[in-house]
Image: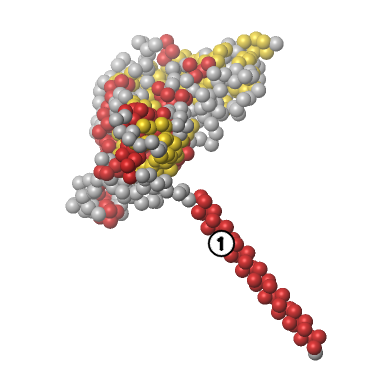
Amino acid sequence: MLVINMKMKKRGQLTVFIVIGIFLLAFLGVVMYFRQETVEQEIPEVVPEYLFPVKQYVDSCLETTAEQGVTVLGAQGGYIYIPERITFDPQSYILFGGIKVPLWYHQGRSRVPNLDVMQNDLERYIAENIDACLADFIVFEQQYDIYPEENRSVEVVITDTAVDVTMTYPMDVKLKSEESTTRITRFNSELFVKLKRMFLLAREMIQAENNQLFFEQITLDLMAAGTDIPFTDVVFECGQKIWYVPEVEEKIKDLLFYNIPKVRVKSTDHEPFEESYARYELLRGYTPQDIMEGNAPQDAPSDAYEYFHFFWDPTVNDYKDLRANFYFQKEWPFFIRVNPSSGQTMKSSWGRGTPQYWLSFLCINAYHFTYDLIFPIHAVVRDDSAFGGKGYAFRFAFPVRINKNEGVSTTFNSEIFENPQTTAGDYCNDRLDKKTIVYATDKKTHEDILDAEITFNCMDFYYCDLGTTDTEFGRNRLAVALPSFCSPPTIEAEHPDYHKSSVTVPPDPSFAEIIMTPLQEMDFRVVKQRLTGPDLQEPEELEEGETAVVYLSTEQLEDYDIFRRYPYDESPEEMQEIKLADDDVKYRLEVLLLSKDNEMIGGFRGNWTVDDADLRGKSTIVFKAIENIPHPSNGDEQIAMIAMLESGAYNEMVMPELS
């Protein structure tokens, strides 16, 4: 029993020692922590009262120089020292009041700075420019002797509400009437500007734009709503409609100039709407059908369109202490390409092949244009409370990209542009180190094609001529170093005897093969067959003054789209022939038969399949059109004729013939 008690006593003593040890360790840890905190905390520098003017003077110069640096940084998209890759590329910035405002995304690359870059730029700017304010302390030459050291350092910390600046600048100072000197080392300034919050809002907006394509959609909506900008339409007017690309470009610029500033950003201090958000959200429940039937509310706010089209929600955070605005200037770089167009001219077509084009019994002008656009938007984030109410603006720019009437994100899964140049064509000169062997191959014979023109295509925006295939080592090919600025690229091949073809190749390919479908050149003419009641008469030539329009397309060949008019007395030579694919192809064929008064009196609509065997030894296509007898004299008869053509009831009897 005694032994047990002794063991228990020893065990209790051991427990006490363990507890004491843990306590001591914890105590030592706390002591060391506070000792470290004390060491790390900056000990305030004591400056004698008679030296206050010097200390305040340097602090004031520090504040003035820092404010100048912050102003420059905000004007130049977060940079004071703009990188050379931006400075020497006029396409990578916009000019605002003579100041370069960088595009935060340019040619597939992010140019968004970070807080470290901004702080470093400010530190460098202050260190390099504060002497202009200090002016060798001449202002104190009658009172003090000041001996500054050459070495000094600046530290900048950007916070949510301020920019804190500390300058270490040792100097010995003494009154001229005294013998003793005093050393002053540190100077401080605090600029009350919400630079960090402004930068974060700007960064969230550029990320949202890349994901949502908000400004691309605004642009397309404005263009579609603009009556002077042709998109897709069928106009029942006589005489071909013609537009000029420079004039259309100017109209687009006008729309952007006047409407982009209307954009308001949710969760910021934007201009108020006429009514509460809830009032506008109620309108979302109404459909176009409701509006057509008169069921929409009659007291809708007058700025409802702006709410639904120009009110942007790019962030989940609260920035109601900041404002955001957007601008477009007509003199900034603006790229436009319209397809189809010839030079600077855009023209409508007659009866271009969609079902609604059959509805005209007068003259038909049909058109469908696609637009490629690239232009910059100038974004400004404002803090009106900054610098004691003077206000502060943080500016940046970003590109709006539209390709074939669709928005294109400025971010890509792979790098699209490595090192593009600014002058058209110059970017083609920067090539990869090794060559790629390019073959153009006949789809039927699998033979190499001689004299095929090879082109480098980057995103349908940049093109570089690479050369033509030539005989080399017993094969027709082209050995060429590809441009390095685009990955992955598309390589295209063209030859007069083949349909234009392309292939997308991986980065830095060793070879590329482009399969090309051969074409057979065919003459063509159009005849008509009268439909009287249920009876279809024998083919006959068109009467004087009658015309036929032929539209031929296929999904099997990219961009195969042929439009011809017959008779073609005054047409260019290339419009007097049709090139069919020497392959098994199903075409979509549409023929409009027009009277001498340009009234629709018949036609053909259906699929036409041509095998390569059908083309052997043939050189002419005879298209056939049904002429409705009697000709339609009113809308109901016109609709009845269209329904007959749509049904395809007579298609087997009026299929084209090859001879």
Identify the residue shown where x is 45% and y is 34%: 152
Identify the residue shown where x is 37% and y is 17%: 342
Residue situated in front as seen by the camera: 539 or 598: 598
Q: Residue furthest left?
A: 299
Please indicate whether residue 380 sits to the left or right of residue 29 in the image: left
Q: Which residue lies furthest to the bottom in this view?
A: 1
Picture coordinates of residue 26, whole percent (x, y) = 60, 65
Picture coordinates of residue 596, whole percent (x, y) = 28, 19
Residue situated in front as seen by the camera: 585 or 538: 585
Residue situated in front as seen by the camera: 477 or 306: 306
Coloring scheme of the render? secondary structure
Quarter of image, res 139: top left
- Which residue is labeled 1 in the image? 30
Identify the residue shown where x is 38% and y is 32%: 146
Q: Label 1 is placed on what type of residue?
A: Val
Residue situated in front as seen by the camera: 659 or 205: 205
Please indicate whether residue 216 sits to the left or right of residue 241 in the image: right
Please indicate whether residue 176 sits to the left or right of residue 171 in the image: left
Disc 1 is placed on an element classified as helix
Identify the residue shown where x is 38% and y is 44%: 47
Quarter of image, res 185: top left
Q: In this view, does 291 lie above or below 185?
A: below
Residue 199 visible here: no
